[in-house]
Amino acid sequence: MEGKYFKYLLLAPALIIVGVTTLLPLIRSFWISLHDWNLTQSVELGEFVALDNYVQAFSDAVFWNSVQVTLIFTLSTVVITISAGIAVAILLSKDKLHLSYLRAVLIIPFALSPALVGYSWRFMLNPDYGLFANIIGFLIPPLADVVWLGHPTTAMAALVSVAVWIWLPFMSLMFISGLMGMPKEVFEAAKIDGANAVQTLFRITIPMLQPIILIASILMTMFAIKQFDPIVTLTSGGPGNSTEVLNFMIYNTSFRYFDMGYGAALGYILAIMTVGFVLLYMRKLVKGGEWN
Amino acid sequence: MDDVNRDKSSNRRAVMKVASAVFENIGVLLIVIFLFLPIFWMFLTAFKPANEVYTLSVFFEPTLDNFRQVFGTNYNFGRFYANSTIVVVVTLAIAIPVSVLAAYSISRFNMPGKQLFMFAILATQFIPLIVNVIPFFMIFRNWGILDTTLALIIVNLGATIPYAIWLIKGFIDNIPIGIEEAGLMDGANRFEVIWHILLPMARPGIITATVFCFVITWNEYMFALILTNQDAVTLPVALSYFVGQDGVIWNEMAAAGMIYVIPTIVFMLIVRKQFVLGMSSGGLK
């Protein structure tokens, strides 16, 4: 049984399942995207229209709005989460008892259902009885009457806050494990040489964290582009369609208006965007010699 | 003169030290407030009587009414709990063994294009899953399994196995191969080696992957939202039942939410250390 094909035999079940549940639908989705198919009119695949659905997207104002919303949401989430994650990691990676307790429970927000988190923030941000809205109003009185989910800008800010809330603990933990694995001598040497805190941060800590920052950025970008649950439960794309990220627009197109062909085409465009992002990072990763 | 200067600078250093300690503690406090206040507030709300929910009161007579309501005949939340449990248990029962075998194979044998394969596995997760749901919706409709737990199990397998392989491979890579070779010399076959030698040693990794896949599946929302509407509805989708015409019944949603999140919190706390290590190193080995 220790034949040449044994290793492939072990791989086969996983390969078949992933193939059937990921690859096949992906190909099928592409095929659907080449057709004009509205489910409310017919349950059979409609007329073949080649790339018309893709062309339609480029002249669709709603689509461009979603692209913009997606980019703003993704970039803000990645930048804020990664930089806040590093800051949190530096604060929490000291050898103190109360910090070690905090590190232990830090993962909790990440384990919570994102759908529930979206609802909770809706509760926290309610202008009348929301705790966060009231705290903000108390600290910064001019903001007391803001209806956070009622304006495009503040709704986007709320959405980014929720995404940061969900991912910050996980990213911080990655950075903490990186920081705690660093040799202490380097920091001591820097201190003896008279480096101040800022110099130490930018000359030593961040460069040494770089491999982890890169991985964390890849993961964060991926997750931010795919974010769906808290968007549905917090803003549902509103007000108007000011927080309608592409992912959510595809959902609306396909399962609210049942325009399957167009939805699939939009899905492919999003997939290509995602892969583009990832390739960008990958090039950096390969250049940095971290792969392998 | 010199002494005075030294005194001054050492004074300044002491002040700086105190200041930075104060800043540090304020920073830590802000982190705690930002991350844990929403959880604490939902926890309080779950025990609030209905008339206190729309106030900021912290002192109130705690009640279990909300929990009774959630599991009462009105919502019948036990049903959704059962659906979620079925989906998770079956998904894990298939995904984990399959992933262990695959991870073992990738970790231990030479294959052409192995790096590319690991990347491809990861790349399946780059693709927004909504792209896959469209064909699934039609296929399941044709098979007549829309709104069943079976449909959810099928799609969740595709969403968990890549992560599980990635995580478990990272852990198997760290197990010295010599022990297995000794076992093989003693006449054990590969499956015996995997079962008796590898599995016990890879246990932390397997548990970590299991918990991670548990969390993914238990919290999975999009598939459930699209593929179910009544019979197979799972917990995250059922939360929307507390959103009514005249607003959200927050106390009941909070109670349902508490019961919903307890398993993930408990499991995640158990494996948090290995989990973070696995996620950050698994793909790079």
Image: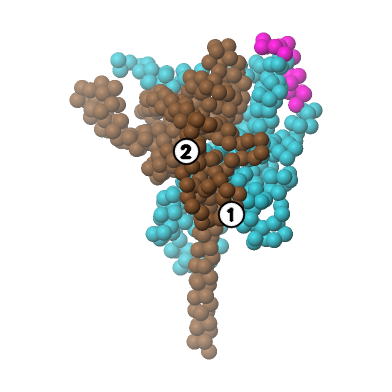
Chain colours: A cyan, B brown
Q: Is residue A153 magenta?
A: no
On residue A259, which mark appears? none
| Disc 2/disc 1 C-alpha distance (Å) | 23 Å
Can residue A50 be spotted in the picture? no
Q: Earlier in the sequence, mark 2 or mark 1?
A: 1
Q: Position of residue A124 (x, y in %)?
A: 60, 49
Q: Could you say which is closer to the camera, residue B174 or residue B41?
A: B41
Establish if A230 lies above or below A16. below
| Residue at figure coordinates x 25%, y 28% from the top left | B196
Q: Is residue A54 magenta?
A: yes
> Which circle, 2 or 1, is nearer the viewer?
2
Q: Position of residue A241 (x, y in %)?
A: 73, 36
Q: Could you say which is closer to the camera, residue A40 or residue B200?
A: A40
Q: Position of residue A36 (x, y in %)?
A: 73, 15
Establish if A145 lies above or below B208. below
| Residue at figure coordinates x 40%, y 42% from the top left | B266
What's under tag 1, amino acid-wise? Answer: Leu
Disc 1 secondary structure class: loop
Residue under label 1? B56
User: On the image, which quarter does residue B282 sit in?
Assistant: top left
Is residue B194 rendered to the left or right of residue B187?
right
Can residue B49 be spotted in the picture? yes
User: On the image, which quarter does residue A162 sit in?
Assistant: top right
Q: Residues within 10 Å of mark 1 (few under 14, many from 20)?
A: some
- Number of numbered markers: 2
Is residue A118 rendered to the left or right of residue A259?
left
Residue under label 2? B68
User: Which residues lie in the magenta part?
Assistant: A41-57
